[in-house]
Image: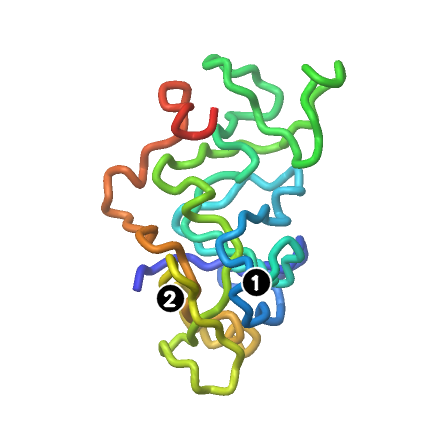
Amino acid sequence: MISSRLLISRGLLGLVASAILFTIAAPGCNSTQGVGDPCRPEREYDATFNGFDVDEVNVESKSYQCQTRLCLVNHFQGRVTCPFGQKIDGTPREDGLPNCILPGTVDSKVTGSPDPKIGAEVKPNLVDRLPEKAVYCSCRCANADGSTDDGANYCECPDGFTCEQLVASIGKEFSQELSGGYCIKSGTKYNSASPTSTVPCSATNKKDCGG
């Protein structure tokens, strides 16, 4: 199993413990309907949020964007809504690419008013870990031991998905409901040793990143 920092969240509330952010949350439902649908993590509505880290796994339960009620952020960098990132709030980019804005808002080219800025430095997405590979609705398919016989609700991954151990057990009672395996798209397991896993989205490859 890949050793990763873990971020478990429900909305924007949480508590910090041992440099890991958790929020008490119930696991998503055990349906596979909607697995693989795109989702936008709720943290992206926070103007001070500077984005996810590629070394982290985020499990956002109670996500009402997902029929499974679970939005998975699997080794993803930056913000889903800002593929090219930004250096600092309000600083024009030399590469001509747009800075980040909050989801649900529009930039000054449309409104004529100042852009709703993200007040933090945001790293760009990685070409090999774009949202379609790393951020989508999922469901819990096994516990931390790889079993499904402990009485909890689990799902069977649909075609095109595999059950991958992503969240290690860390000894916290509430986190046991979220530890274990999740359905990920086949062929998208994170490999930190792969050279392509560190290539950031930029002006030179913007077509690959949806620009």
Amino acid found under the numbered disc labelled 1: Phe
Query: Would residue 100 be seen by someone viewing this image from the given angle?
Result: yes
Nearest to the observer: residue 15 or residue 201: 201
Front of the two marks 2 and 1? 2
Q: Amino acid at mark 2?
A: Cys
Residue lying at the far front in this picture: please name it: 159
Separation of residues labelled 2 and 1 (CA atoms) = 23 Å
Residue wearing tag 1: 22
Residue 21 in view, yes or no: no
Q: Element at badge 2?
A: strand
| Side of 168 where 139 appears, left or right | right
The answer to which image quadrant residue 207 occupies is: top left
In this view of the protein, which residue sits in the foreground, 174 or 108?
108
Query: Mark on residue 104?
Result: none
Tell me if residue 189 comes above or below residue 28 in the rendering.
above
Is 33 in front, or is 110?
A: 33
- Judging by the rendered image, the residue that carries numbered circle 2 is 163
First reached walking from the N terminus: tag 2 or tag 1: 1
Tell me the crowding category of disc 2: few under 14, some 14 to 19, or many 20 or more residues within 10 angstroms, Cα based.
many
Residue 16 rendering spot, x and y as whole percentages: 57, 60
Residue occupying the point 49% across, 39% down = 78
Residue at image x 63%, y 32%? Answer: 119
- Most foreground residue, 16 or 187: 187
In the rendered image, the quadrant that contains the N terminus is bottom left
Residue at (51%, 16%) from the top-left corner?
Answer: 93
Splitting the image into 4 quarters, where does residue 108 fall?
top right
Element at label 1: strand
